[in-house]
Each structure stands twice: as structure tokens, then as C-alpha cells.
Amino acid sequence: MKDLGENLEYVRAIVNSTIELKKIELTETSSRAVGVGILCSIIGIIALFVLSIAIILSTLLIAQSMQSLNYALLIMGGILLLFILIIYLLRKPLIFKPITNIFYSSLLK
């Protein structure tokens, strides 16, 4: 009976250690995910700022070369609509599949 009690204590210690390790792994994974999310947000904000300035400057350049702000705005609007249409049509291979692959690869580690 004494051996059975010792074995039971060993099993409890192993189970508790396993649970603690899983908690630590979950905490590391969560902190990494939050860090990546914050980094992506910062990069996205900077990219949006740079893209906005590039759109404004290219519109002004087109307006200066065509001598018409209305046509420049119309051309830039058309280019932006074309980009939006391309991104919409390619949303699965460009956006959804990479995010799904990243999510599954982080779960399988």
C-alpha cells in the first residue's frame, strides 16, 4: 500500500507539472500573438499614412500634368477602385489562406 501511495503522489506531481507547463506555453503563445498584433497594427498605421501621402502627391502630380484637378481626382478614383476590385477578387488567396495557415501552424507547434 505504501508503494501505491507513492506512485499516486508521483502521478499527481507529473499531472500538476504538465498542467503548469501547458499554462506557461499558453501564456507564451498568447503574448507572442498579442505582440504580433500590436506590431502589425503599428506597421499598418504607418503604411496607411505613407500610402495616403503617396496618393495625395500622385493626384497633385497628375493634376499638374493634366492642368485639371477634376480629371486627376477621377483618374485616382478609378485606380483606387481597380485596386479595391483586385483585392476583393483575390481576398481568399491573399488574405484568408495566409491567416489560416499562420493560425494552424501556431496551433501545431
Image (cartoon, rainbow, N blue to C red):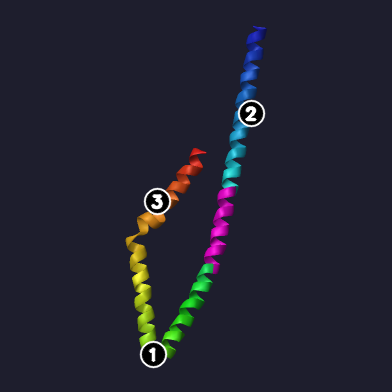
Residue type, mark 1 in image = Met
Foreground mark, 1 or 3, reads 1
Kindly report the distance in space between the C-alpha atoms of the residues bearing marks 1 and 3: 41 Å
Kindly report the distance in space between the C-alpha atoms of the residues bearing marks 3 and 2: 36 Å
Residue type, mark 3 in image = Lys
Residue identifier under label 3: 97
Residue drawn at x 49%, y 38% as measured from the top left: 108
- The mark found on residue 66 in the picture is 1
Q: Which of the 4 image quarters holds residue 79?
A: bottom left
Q: Earlier in the sequence, mark 3 or mark 2?
A: 2
Residue drawn at x 33%, y 67% as measured from the top left: 85
Residue at the far bottom in the pictured view? 67
Q: Earlier in the sequence, mark 2 or mark 1?
A: 2
Q: Which residues are magenta?
A: 32-46
SS label for mark 2: helix
Question: Is residue 105 found inside the magenta-colored segment of the image?
Answer: no
Height in image: 66 above or below 42?
below
Residue identifier under label 2: 17
Counting from the top left corner in percent of width and height, residue 38 is at: 57, 58
**Disc 3: CA contacts within 10 A as few (<14), some (14-19) or many (>=20):** few
